[in-house]
Image (tube, rainbow, N blue to C red):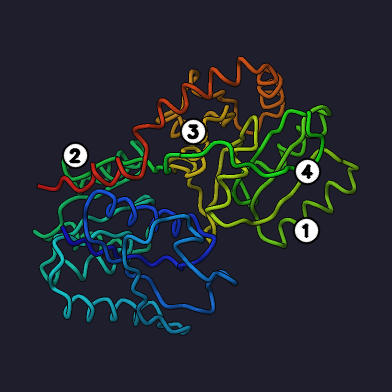
């Protein structure tokens, strides 16, 4: 099958959505399909010093990335959408159009392409014009189904009443299988301490404040933070300097490919989400329906996970494959880390996590989604 993936992700960039898109294109190709990815040509927003985007994301060169015109103007998004339209006019030999870019997917149905649209947000969070386009998309006979990332998000769409149950498929996010657990980073700090790690952004709702509080209370563990913008890292480094904390270490942003080596190096991994969680470039709350990539990456690395006990995370995590703690509760988080000082406790959770992970590989996800007839 020839698949056209329509995205609005900046590639290469630091965003989770760009990682998701690249991993899914690889996965479709791994399942035997021919894949072309469309992305906006916005050089001013690209991650700097990236020579090879496939290597940067740690994916195979088994699909084609096609950049389309997206000038740095107020009407840039409109012009990019127009570029997609003309691309579709010239290239009519795709069996399926898949994407997370609503406007592009809608245009594809107008040109009589079979379309699967993937949504990572509630329809209630959409602006009015997007809701109108969404309704037009799903009313087309060429629209095959909506893919959502959690049961809770599916329920939000069903509540609206504009889509039937059989038109919505749940597919939690995923990760690649880890083939080498031994490639590690030489971490800073005490080599004999319990190494507690976090990988991800440092903005609101991610629990960085809680991690710092843990570092204050647990002197014989070292805490390792991977990710964040330069501004965020500078702020938190100054913050802990004033506290005279020496067991917390910041590594800054590393490429998606390199995060694997850090995860390999940790004994315990954290996802201490707050009760409200924002995403990059969006102040909205995604805590009710999110499907965080880091959860599946942690599972794939066979790690003992401590995560906030949010209903949406319980769709994947449970008391057998992780320790779930009350969000924003420092005592719960500290107690969980103390429990995982015992190696047998870590191994029990890690072994169950990697068993459960097998159904969340990108390849399995892509295979399940392409069954459209």
Q: Is residue 171 above or below residue 235?
A: above
* Location of residue 189 by image quarter: top right
Q: Nearer the viewer, mark 4 or mark 1?
A: 4
The first of marks 2 and 4 along the sequence is 2
What residue is disc 3 on? 299
Q: Secondary structure at mark 3?
A: helix
Judging by the rendered image, the residue that carries numbered circle 2 is: 165
Q: Earlier in the sequence, mark 4 or mark 1?
A: 4
Looking at the rendered structure, the secondary structure element under dot 2 is helix
Q: Is residue 150 left or right of residue 13?
A: left
Q: Which residue is mark 1?
A: 234
Decide which of tag 4 and tag 3 comes sooner along the chain.
4
Which residue: 41% across, 53% down?
20
Q: Nearer the viewer, residue 275 or 81?
A: 81
Q: Crowding at label 1, few (<14), some or many (≥20) Cα neighbours within 10 Å?
A: few
Mark 4: few/some/many CA within 10 Å (<14, 14-19, 20+): some
Please say if the residues under marks 4 and 1 sit with CB atoms less than 8 Å apart.
no
């Amino acid at each position: 099958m020839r698949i056209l993936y329509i995205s609005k992700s900046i590639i290469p960039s630091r965003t989770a959505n760009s990682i998701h898109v690249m991993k899914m294109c690889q996965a479709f190709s791994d399942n035997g399909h021919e894949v072309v990815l469309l992305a906006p040509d916005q050089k001013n927003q690209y991650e700097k010093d990236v020579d090879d985007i496939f290597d940067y994301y740690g994916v195979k060169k088994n699909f084609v990335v096609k950049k389309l015109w997206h000038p740095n103007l107020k009407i840039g998004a409109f012009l990019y959408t127009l570029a997609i339209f003309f691309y579709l006019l010239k290239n009519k030999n795709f069996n399926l159009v898949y994407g997370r870019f609503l406007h592009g997917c809608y245009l594809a149905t107008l040109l009589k392409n079979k379309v699967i649209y993937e949504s990572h947000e509630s329809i209630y969070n959409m602006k009015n014009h997007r809701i109108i386009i969404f309704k037009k998309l799903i009313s087309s006979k060429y629209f095959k189904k909506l893919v959502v990332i959690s049961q809770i998000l599916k329920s939000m769409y069903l509540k609206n009443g504009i889509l039937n149950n059989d038109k919505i498929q749940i597919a939690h996010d995923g990760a690649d299988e880890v083939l080498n657990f031994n490639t590690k980073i030489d971490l800073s700090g005490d080599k004999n301490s319990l190494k507690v790690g976090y990988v991800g952004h440092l903005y609101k709702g991610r629990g960085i404040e809680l991690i710092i509080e843990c570092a204050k209370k647990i002197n014989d563990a070292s805490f390792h933070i991977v990710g964040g913008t330069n501004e965020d890292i500078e702020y938190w480094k100054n913050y802990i300097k004033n506290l005279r904390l020496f067991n917390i270490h910041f590594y800054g942003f590393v490429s998606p490919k390199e995060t694997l080596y850090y995860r390999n190096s940790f004994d315990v991994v954290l996802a201490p989400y707050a009760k409200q969680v924002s995403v990059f470039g969006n102040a909205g709350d995604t805590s009710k329906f999110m499907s965080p990539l880091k959860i599946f990456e942690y599972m794939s690395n066979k790690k003992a996970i401590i995560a906030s006990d949010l209903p949406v995370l319980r769709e994947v995590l449970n008391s057998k494959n992780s320790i779930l703690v009350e969000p924003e509760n420092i005592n719960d988080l500290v107690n969980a880390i103390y429990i995982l000082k015992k190696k047998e406790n870590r191994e029990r959770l890690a072994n169950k996590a990697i068993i459960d992970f097998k159904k969340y590989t990108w390849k399995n996800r892509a295979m399940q989604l392409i069954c459209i007839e």
